[in-house]
Every structure is written in structure tokens, then in C-alpha cells.
Image (cartoon, rainbow, N blue to C red):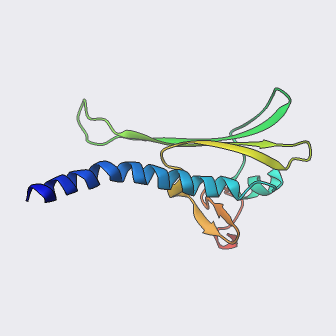
Amino acid sequence: MKKYIILLLAIILVQPSSLAVGMKNTMGKVMDSWIGENIDTVINHWGYPSSEKEIAGKKLYYWLNSSYVVSGNQYGVYGGESTCNRILEVDKNNTVVKWQWEGNSCPSTYIFSGKKLVNPNNNPWKKKSEL
């Protein structure tokens, strides 16, 4: 019985780190799938970026998504925030060359569509049936 309890505790402690690794791998695949594409193609799938910046001669596009969920209906009960922030760097031809992401809800918002992993809810101009 003691062995089963220790095994159960080990599984519980290891599982969150396994999920985090899986999330990073999935999001890495999402972002890697856009390397070499023109930024206009990305915008057609993701929707307009939150902002564009040029820093140290590099052109960066930012998609910043977050939502806050309140749980409970009494004072002192809080929810959590879901975020998915993505940054793409493009070269002088507007081709995606680098990426960065951070957040806790990125992979769960993506689906595989053709050769790209895309978020079907980000682009109001593209019909979901086209994805």
C-alpha cells in the first residue's frame, strides 16, 4: 500500500512538468510551421497583429492575447489569466525568420489545418470552412 501511495505521488508530481514540456513542443511546432512564410500569409491566418515594431533594425510583429477568468461570486475569490503572446521577426522581404512565444494557453487554442497549425478564431475575415 505504501508503494502505491509513493507511486501515485510520483506520478502527480511528474505530470505537470510533462504537460509543460508537451505544451512547449506543440507551440514550437506551431511557430516553426511559419518560418519561411511571408508575413501577409501569417496575418491571413492569425488576423492583424496587436502591434508592429522595428528594434535594432529588425521588424517585429506582436500578437498579444489574454483573458481573465473570475471564479466564484464572492469577495476574495479569484480566477486566473490565460495568455498567449507571439512575436515574429521578418527579414527585408517580409519572410518570417525567427519567433518567440510565452503564455499558458497557446497550444490549446490551435488546430492543425493543412500544413499549418492555426488559430481559427483569430481572423474575422477568413471563414472557418476555408481553414
Residue 122 visible in the shown view: no
| 40 relative to 70 in the view: left or right | right
| 129 relative to 16 in the view: left or right | right
In percent of width and height, residue 101 lies at 61, 43
| Quadrant the N terminus occupies | bottom left
Taking depth in this image into account, of 42 and 30 the one nearest to the observer is: 30
Residue 90 visible in the shown view: yes
Q: Residue at x 61, y 62 (%)?
A: 120
In percent of width and height, residue 35 lies at 76, 54
Extreme left residue here?
Answer: 1
Q: Residue at x 38, y 39 (%)?
A: 80
| Quadrant the C terminus occupies | bottom right
| 107 relative to 72 in the view: left or right | right
Q: Residue at x 70, y 52 (%)?
A: 47
In percent of width and height, residue 49 lies at 71, 43
In percent of width and height, residue 34 lies at 73, 56
Extreme right residue here?
Answer: 93
Q: Residue at x 81, y 50 (%)?
A: 39
Q: Quadrant of residue 81?
A: top left
Taking depth in this image into account, of 99 and 121 the one nearest to the observer is: 99
Q: How many marks?
A: 0
Extreme top residue here?
Answer: 56
Q: Quadrant of residue 113?
A: bottom right
